[in-house]
Image (tube, coloured by chain):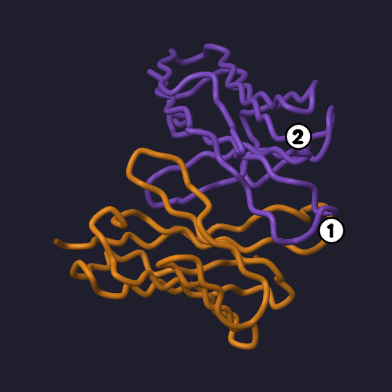
Amino acid sequence: DVKVTQSSRYLVKRTGEKVFLECVQDMDHENMFWYRQDPGLGLRLIYFSYDVKMKEKGDIPEGYSVSREKKERFSLILESASTNQTSMYLCASSLSILAGGLFGQYFGPGTRLTVL
Amino acid sequence: QKEVEQNSGPLSVPEGAIASLNCTYSDRVSQSFFWYRQYSGKSPELIMSIYSNGDKEDGRFTAQLNKASQYVSLLIRDSQPSDSATYLCAVKENYGGSQGNLIFGKGTKLSVKP
């Protein structure tokens, strides 16, 4: 079974703090993704990565950065947390597109971040 | 702008009935389609994938794909209260630097009444 783990289930931070969210997958997947999910807005892609040290902006990258130093680990960084970044953050991983089309993404349990 | 549309619901069905969840997508070249189940407060769980026109069955779940109509559906037979969740439809992007990315619908909330 694919296993994607995230560093925290719940996190409370203060405005202006630097926040690190970590994601680890154990299935040797090439692709990793960070989403946020808010009521009424659905899943929104923040950043994704197709390989180590590689990153691409998703739909809402502003206020976020990412790091992928090892294949199994993808970190999301909130440089200076703001209250509008209060959300559920979801990490996902998948096989490379070169492995074929019928592979979906597998999600971690999520981190519910509250910024006060 | 590529879109995946779902009726937000809630869709309410009695226990034992067939629940029918529908999804339409805008990108004609899309090839791969996925259904996720998300319980309240939990993360999405992949339950079905389909890429050929027609039906694909897995236990009580059947995914149906009609590429000509740009329509994908999920049928849940013998619905159980434990099926109550939000179901997300996702379509894989098919070109450029976004290959491998999924476009998600906002989900349909299903409620199965005992």
Residue extending furthest left? B114
| Mark 1 lies on residue | B96
> Dot 1: within a 10 Å radius of its alpha carbon, few (fewer than 14), some, or many (20 or more) residues?
few
Q: Quadrant of the N terminus of chain B?
A: bottom right
Q: Secondary structure at mark 1?
A: helix
Q: Is residue B65 above or below residue A29?
A: below
Side of A103 where B99 appears, left or right: right
Q: Quadrant of the C terminus of chain B?
A: bottom left
Chain letter, purple: A
Residue A28 percent location from the top left of the image? 76, 34
Residue, x 58% and y 13% (percent of image)?
A18
Instruction: Report the front residue among B83 and A34.
Output: B83
Instruction: Report the front residue among B35 and A113.
Output: B35
| Mark 2 lies on residue | A28
Residue B7 percent location from the top left of the image? 38, 69
Which image quadrant is residue A87 in? top left
